[in-house]
């Protein structure tokens, strides 16, 4: 495991970050968790994450906006949208705006890991595992 | 007055038209968004369905129960709202929720493409090219949704009373025209149509209760109703749920009686490899349809590594659980290994048909197979086929047949192979002719032998034989097989005709 | 009844022609069902119709040739013939037959008594009967025990595999894999079995009675394959026998054809029977028939013993004993065939019922509305 993948997870429900962080760390990701969009966007300005995982429905700024900002700042970053209120329209909008993939809640961490593995692959990143390493 | 179903595509002006119509008519307005929100509140994650449609490959898989639940919520929401008064509903193809309900006006809105593109570009802040692609994709997704959810083609105009094209017609004028049409007597409720709607509502509510109660959430239950009598059909494997069902349903308004019945007949289908697109599937399914039977799948790998029967469930419909934030636990590794995906697909296809009796997979000796077959289930037919795949074809035929015979000790139902299932009921014409020819030849041969006994015997053991004994040998060597083959073919055809082959 | 051509060929009437067809049917049903056994009832049956023993044997051979051919073809169609197994068995079976013929003719020359069964003397008859009794008692008892044994063992209701497993552990290379039977057997064991089967076939035409169970219990070959492969092998044996008997002038083709008329139909029904009747039942019926044949033969033994002066009792007993022997034989044959027919008819009717229901459309259930 040479490199680690930098991942930002943004969801206004704290439990999501708490559950996802260890699940992603297991497969070789460095995970930073945010519960509000502003600090997250601030952090994104400081650092180019390889992968951003964001919820769509949030209080102040919604995930689509986060997506737009990330794509404007770092076009290489892969943004993965997660939401419990997915519709065809929102999913297509997100994909049109450059989201890498779209996952509807509820999902299993493995589903996200699979998507992240694909994203890492498209980044030319080798050190990621599809399944946890014990 | 009627329920007006306005169906359209996103950003196509249909929603504005529907709202305008509701305002003009003074009806209540309901849209898809509200239905979806209510489904989400009830713990039915409609988003999973939507995303499954965007990600094409697995549309049919795992989504069937979720779809049925969504349909139930949508039906209930619309019926409840419409019962209180008049209603305009805007959605994708909502009128399919109330088949058999007469006081429904079905309107399809065709957008003006240029205006729609502009709206998308402006509202979603997308460049023209991306907006065009967005529209193409969304339309395709919605068409797929309607096909998957309602099993109809959205573009089929026979399913609408009226198509409104907004290319020339302004929104206001379209609304005004619809107003007068909605008030026509053709769309007025009748006692029959009201009753039909009540029936739909009752059924939908029952489904929702069964789906949301954790005791019955994962069961394969069929809900029917007639004049306020709910009939819940369960498959034999889930017979232990029967006493719970009235409890779960409680006191549904409009429900006079709850009847729980086991699926009347059951077909057990034993194979090593299942495919939902196989001829056997069609035959078994057709049979199940005729009989109103549930089909139980049993995947059996003979001689494999021994293991207890593992029930294979169609992945339970996802439900939002409190406290997880929508992130579930990973499946334990072992659970993934049990069955292969074509087996699951077959099971899911059956669930979709409403005929699944559950599925199991078992490996090992015959005793394992027998152990996996429930004694308490009154099967009416057992289909055995496509087993012993690692053996040579010749051995496979025989071993499958032997297994079928072996099972007759344990199962009272008739055991058929697929060949039996699809066996031709009639002999082919060529075969009949061949048999007739063989018959004629046999008669001629026998006539020749018995009308010329003296000569024959002379050759076989008389004067002629003394001169040339080898003639008798040749005669026997020729006649015995010829008579056998001809007569044998005749008999084979006769056996086939008697269905004894 | 007038005889034709120096008492060799009988005069045919409608009555005895019909009797021959029925005889063929009974033999055929048992052959098709139990794998072998036409000979044990047909030869004595024909002799009862006043056919001279040697002609009975010869005509029977000729009919068996055709019969076995169709039987084998039928079994092959059902996937029950392992050709590799049959051919290997045949190689040594031919040798076995020659040994048997040699022993038989030697004993025949020793003479004794004035018996006419099988055309041999009392010594030969006794020898044949004893072999018959010995082999079939063993085989029948073994099969019967296996069939009625309580079904609590691990193998379920399949034939016992204990012996087969034991033999398969013996280090006797080369081993050969038989694809249809799906077993691996030492070549030596197969050749040995061929020899024994050939020997028994040549002695009393009961090779199949040992061959089939031996394949089942010693080699672990499935019952239906054992039956089919034995028939396939017997087809060649039958051809060889029929041609040589014909050369000697001992084949009455009319009789062969009449037998064939019944027996071929019987074989078809019997083979269908193995398809629809449970394996346990197949073995139960077959073993019962075999044991009844043993009893029949055993009843006749004192007659030969008396003829050889080993035993002394009144001559008046002789026809009774012979009659009893024949009666038991026919009871076994007709009873067995009747039982098989009964099961076949029953199974057929059951299947018919299913097929009939397949055609009845039930009203379409109301779709799962929602």
Image (cartoon, coloured by chain):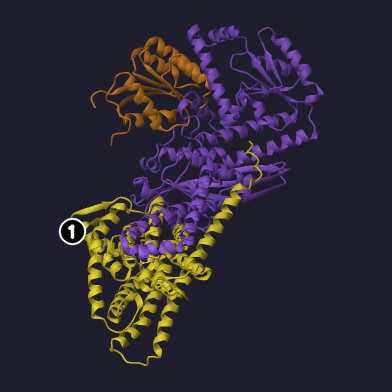
Chain colours: A orange, B purple, C yellow
Element carrying mark 1:
loop
Q: Nearer the viewer, residue B306 or B212?
A: B306
Does residue B366 show up?
A: no
Closer-to-camera residue (C188/C128) = C128
**Other residues around mark 1 within 10 Å, as few (<14) / some (14–19) / many (≥20):** few
Expressed as whole percent of the image width and height from the top left, the position of residue B262 reads 60, 51
Residue displayed at 40% across by 40% down? B340
Q: Say whether residue C361 is left or right of residue C328.
A: right
Q: Badge 1 is on which residue?
A: C172
Numbered disc total: 1
Side of A36 relative to C137 (left or right): right
Residue B80 seen in render: yes
Please give the name of the residue rendered at 28% of the width and 68% of the height, measured from the top-left corner.
Answer: C202
Q: Is residue B359 above or below residue C134?
A: above
Identify the image quadrant of residue C363: top right
Left or right of residue A35, residue C168 in this image = left
Residue C100 image offset from top left, x and y in percent: 25, 69
Q: Which image quadrant: the N terminus of chain B?
A: top right
Q: Nearer the viewer, residue B247 or B436?
A: B436
Q: Residue at x 69, y 14 (%)?
A: B164
Q: Quadrant of residue B221 in the image?
A: top right
Q: Position of residue C88 (x, y in %)?
A: 25, 56
Residue C296's spot in the image, x, y percent? 39, 78
Subunit under mark 1: C
Vertical arrangement, residue B260 with respect to residue C274, above or below: above
């Amino acid at each position: 495991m040479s490199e680690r993948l930098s991942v930002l997870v943004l969801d206004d429900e704290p439990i999501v970050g708490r559950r996802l962080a260890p699940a992603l760390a297991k497969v070789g990701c460095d995970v930073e968790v945010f519960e509000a969009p502003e600090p997250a966007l601030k952090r994104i300005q400081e650092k180019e994450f390889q992968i951003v995982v964001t919820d769509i429905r949030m209080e102040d700024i919604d995930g689509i906006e986060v997506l737009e900002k990330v794509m404007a700042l770092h076009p290489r970053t892969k943004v993965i949208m997660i939401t419990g209120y997915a519709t065809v329209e929102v999913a297509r909008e997100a994909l049109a705006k450059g989201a890498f993939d779209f996952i509807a809640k509820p999902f299993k961490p493995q589903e996200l890991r699979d998507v992240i593995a694909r994203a890492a692959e498209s980044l030319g990143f080798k050190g990621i595992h599809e399944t946890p390493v014990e | 007055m009627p329920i007006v179903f306005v169906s359209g595509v996103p950003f196509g002006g249909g929603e504005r038209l529907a709202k305008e119509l509701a305002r003009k008519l003074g009806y209540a307005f309901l849209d898809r968004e509200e239905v979806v929100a209510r489904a989400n509140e009830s713990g039915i994650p409609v988003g999973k369905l939507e995303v499954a449609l965007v990600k094409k490959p697995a549309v049919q898989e795992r989504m069937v129960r979720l779809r049925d639940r969504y349909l139930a919520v949508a039906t209930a929401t619309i019926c409840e709202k419409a019962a209180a008064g008049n209603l305009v509903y805007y959605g994708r193809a909502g009128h399919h929720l109330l088949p058999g309900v007469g006081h429904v006006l079905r309107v399809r809105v065709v957008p003006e493409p240029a205006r729609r593109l502009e709206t998308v570009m402006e509202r979603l802040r997308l460049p023209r090219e991306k907006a065009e692609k967005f529209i193409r994709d969304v339309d395709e997704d919605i068409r797929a949704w309607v096909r998957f959810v309602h099993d109809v083609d959205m573009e089929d105009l026979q399913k609408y009373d009226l198509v409104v094209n907004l290319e020339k017609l302004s929104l206001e004028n379209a609304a005004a025209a619809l107003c007068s049409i909605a008030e026509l007597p053709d769309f007025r409720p009748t006692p029959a149509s009201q009753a039909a709607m009540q029936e739909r509502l009752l059924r939908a509510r029952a489904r929702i209760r069964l789906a949301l109660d954790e005791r019955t959430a994962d069961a394969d239950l069929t809900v029917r109703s007639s004049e306020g009598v709910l009939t819940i059909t369960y498959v034999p494997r889930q017979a232990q749920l029967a006493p719970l069902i009235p409890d779960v349903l409680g006191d549904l308004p409009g429900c006079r009686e709850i009847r729980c019945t086991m699926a009347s007949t059951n077909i057990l289908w034993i194979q090593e490899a299942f495919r939902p697109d196989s001829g056997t599937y069609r035959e078994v399914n057709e049979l199940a349809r005729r009989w109103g039977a549930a089909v139980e799948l049993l995947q059996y790998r003979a001689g494999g590594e021994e293991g207890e029967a593992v029930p294979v469930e169609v992945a339970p419909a996802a439900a939002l659980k409190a406290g997880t934030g929508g992130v579930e636990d990973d499946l334990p590794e072992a659970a993934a290994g049990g069955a292969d995906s074509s087996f699951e697909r077959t099971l899911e296809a059956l669930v979709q048909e409403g005929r699944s009796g559950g599925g199991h997979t078992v490996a090992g000796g015959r005793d394992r197979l027998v152990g996996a077959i429930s004694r308490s289930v009154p099967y009416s037919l057992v289909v055995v086929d496509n087993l012993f795949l690692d053996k040579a074809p010749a051995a496979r035929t025989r071993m499958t047949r032997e297994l079928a015979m072996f099972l007759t000790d344990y199962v009272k139902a008739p055991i058929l192979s697929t060949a039996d299932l699809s066996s031709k009921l009639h002999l082919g014409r060529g075969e009949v002719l061949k048999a007739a020819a063989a018959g004629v030849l046999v008669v001629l041969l026998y006539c020749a032998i018995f009308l010329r006994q003296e000569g024959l015997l002379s050759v076989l053991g008389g004067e002629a034989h003394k001169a040339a004994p080898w003639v008798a040998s040749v005669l026997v060597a020729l006649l015995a097989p010829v008579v056998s083959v001809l007569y044998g073919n005749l008999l084979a055809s006769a056996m086939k005709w008697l269905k004894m082959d | 009844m007038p005889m034709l051509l120096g008492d060799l060929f009988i005069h045919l009437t409608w009555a005895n022609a019909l009797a021959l067809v029925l005889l063929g049917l009974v033999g055929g049903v048992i052959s098709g069902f139990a794998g072998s056994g036409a000979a044990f009832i047909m030869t004595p049956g024909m002799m009862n119709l006043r056919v001279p023993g040697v002609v009975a044997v010869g005509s029977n051979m000729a009919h068996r040739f055709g019969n076995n051919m169709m039987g084998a073809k039928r079994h092959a169609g059902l996937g029950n013939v392992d050709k590799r197994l049959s051919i290997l068995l045949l190689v040594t079976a031919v040798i076995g037959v020659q040994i048997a013929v040699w022993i038989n003719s030697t004993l025949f020359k020793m003479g004794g008594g004035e018996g006419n069964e099988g055309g041999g003397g009392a010594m030969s008859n006794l020898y044949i009967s004893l072999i018959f009794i010995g082999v079939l008692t063993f085989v029948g008892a073994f099969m019967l025990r296996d069939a009625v044994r309580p079904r609590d063992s691990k193998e379920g209701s399949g034939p016992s595999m204990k012996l087969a497993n034991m033999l398969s552990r013996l280090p006797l290379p080369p081993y050969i894999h038989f694809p249809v039977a799906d077993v691996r057997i030492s070549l030596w064991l197969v050749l040995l079995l061929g020899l024994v089967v050939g020997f028994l076939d040549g002695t009393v035409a009961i090779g199949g009675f040992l061959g089939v169970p031996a394949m089942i219990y010693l080699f672990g070959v499935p019952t239906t394959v054992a039956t089919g492969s034995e028939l396939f092998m017997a087809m060649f044996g039958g051809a060889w026998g029929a041609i040589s008997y014909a050369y000697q002038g001992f084949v009455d083709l009319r009789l062969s054809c009449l037998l064939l008329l019944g027996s071929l139909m019987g074989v078809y029904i019997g083979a269908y029977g193995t398809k629809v009747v449970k394996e346990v039942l197949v073995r139960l019926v077959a073993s019962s028939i075999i044991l009844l044949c043993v009893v029949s033969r055993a009843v006749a033994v004192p007659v030969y013993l008396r003829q050889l002066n080993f035993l002394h009792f009144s001559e008046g007993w002789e026809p009774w004993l012979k009659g009893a022997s024949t009666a038991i034989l026919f009871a076994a044959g007709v009873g067995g065939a009747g039982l098989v027919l009964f099961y076949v008819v029953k199974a057929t009717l059951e299947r018919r019922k299913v097929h009939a229901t397949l055609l009845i459309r039930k009203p379409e259930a109301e779709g799962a509305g929602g």
